[in-house]
Image: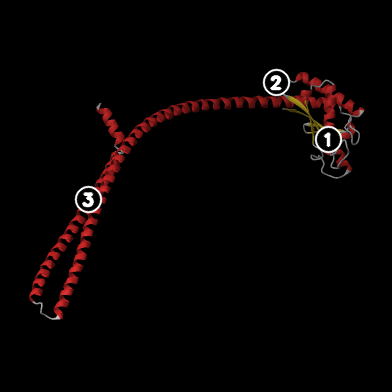
């Protein structure tokens, strides 16, 4: 029980000083108003008392003057003027007395106004007490919600820690798998290089008497005139014969390459820099692409699996000879064969 009170006292301790300050301020305001009211009453009473004394004194003087006037009726006009002046003074004093009486009534009204303000402040103080009680209730509710929120945050932190640990383990696993994959790919690339060498060796043997077919790096280059008529994408009989030999070499190579090596034969079509424009081929893009596609279709007709073939057209944008001579144009009009992995 004592611990409960201590805990509640700790919860309310943050609000009690502010509450006491509000009460102290209100009490000081009420005390100040009452002091002002008492001082006003005191000075009003003093003024009224002083005026009453002056009035009595003047009244006595008037009585004395009236007596003297009755005894000295025979005096000169100057005495009558003095009497008139005294009567005027009497009238002025009466008017002032009435003003003071009115001031006394105004003081009463101010006192009533002060009492009304005191009553209003008392009502406001009671309202503030009610508001403070409601605020304390809301503080209790907010504290409970804060405790629940802290528990949720703690649970989320635990879950985050566990997730980070799993993430670290997953990252290690991914790195390990990546290293294995890179090693496997490197191995496949090396194997593919070996099979590419064998494939190109066979093609060199088959096409060793053809001067119009060249080997550049890892690619076989066929001049377009060997395979197609000028401005056409239809294979010539001579071109078909050359493709028959390539198809035979590909089918033999396919038997030797392991199935886990994802290889492909890429056929690239190229043109020279001179533009072409006709209904069938609006530009060199269409001509180079159509020629590469024609080679692919012919190889497929000879039994080469279509999923191992890729056709691409480069137009005139990858020349092997940047010159503008007829010899350079002849070199750039070509079909390239490249054995690669996907």
Residue 185 percent across, percent down from the top left: 67, 26
Viewer can see residue 254: yes
In the rendered image, the residue lying farthest to the left is 71
Q: Mark 1 or mark 2, which has the lower sequence index? A: 2
- The answer to whether the residue labelled 3 contacts the one labelled 2, judged by CB atoms less than 8 Å apart, is no
**Mark 3 surroundings: few (<14), some (14-19) or many (≥20) residues within 10 A:** some
Q: How is the image coloured?
A: secondary structure
Q: Mark 1 or mark 3, which has the lower sequence index? A: 3
Q: Is residue 19 left or right of residue 196?
A: left
Tell me the SS state at disc 2: loop
Residue 191 percent across, percent down from the top left: 71, 24
If the image is split into quadrants, where does the N terminus sit? top left
Tell me the SS state at disc 1: helix
**Mark 2 surroundings: few (<14), some (14-19) or many (≥20) residues within 10 A:** few
> Observer-nearest residue: 301 or 214?
301
Viewer can see residue 214: no
If the image is split into quadrants, where does the C terminus sit? top right
How many numbered discs?
Answer: 3
Q: Mark 3 or mark 2, which has the lower sequence index? A: 3
Q: Which residue is mark 2?
A: 260
């Amino acid at each position: 029980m004592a611990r409960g009170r201590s805990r509640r006292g700790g919860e309310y301790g943050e609000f009690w000083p502010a509450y006491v300050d509000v009460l102290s301020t209100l009490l000081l305001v009420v005390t100040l108003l009452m002091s002002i009211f008492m001082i006003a009453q005191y000075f009003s009473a003093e003024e009224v008392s002083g005026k009453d004394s002056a009035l009595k004194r003047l009244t006595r003087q008037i009585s004395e003057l009236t007596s003297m006037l009755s005894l000295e009726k025979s005096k000169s006009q100057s005495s009558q003027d003095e009497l008139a002046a005294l009567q005027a003074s009497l009238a002025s004093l009466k008017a002032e007395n009435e003003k003071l009486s009115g001031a006394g009534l105004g003081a009463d009204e101010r006192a009533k106004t002060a009492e009304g303000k005191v009553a209003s402040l008392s009502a406001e103080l009671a309202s503030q007490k009610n508001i403070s009680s409601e605020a304390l209730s809301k503080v209790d509710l907010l504290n409970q919600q804060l405790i629940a929120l802290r528990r949720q945050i703690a649970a989320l932190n635990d879950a985050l820690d566990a997730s980070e640990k799993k993430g670290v383990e997953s990252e290690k696993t991914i790195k390990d798998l990546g290293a294995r994959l890179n090693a496997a790919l490197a191995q496949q690339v090396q194997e593919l290089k070996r099979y590419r060498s064998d494939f190109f060796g066979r093609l060199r043997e088959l096409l060793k008497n053809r001067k119009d077919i060249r080997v550049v790096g890892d690619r076989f280059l066929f001049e377009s005139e060997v395979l197609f008529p000028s401005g056409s994408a239809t294979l010539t009989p001579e071109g078909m014969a050359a493709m028959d030999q390539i198809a035979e070499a590909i089918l033999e190579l396919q038997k030797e390459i392991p199935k886990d090596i994802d290889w492909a034969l890429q056929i690239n079509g190229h043109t020279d820099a001179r533009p072409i424009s006709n209904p069938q081929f609006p530009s060199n893009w269409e001509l180079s692409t159509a020629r590469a596609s024609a080679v692919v279709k012919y190889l497929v007709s000879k039994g080469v699996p279509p999923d191992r073939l890729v056709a691409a057209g480069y137009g005139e944008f990858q020349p092997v000879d940047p010159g503008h001579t007829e010899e350079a144009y002849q070199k750039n009009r070509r079909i390239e064969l490249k054995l690669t992995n996907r």
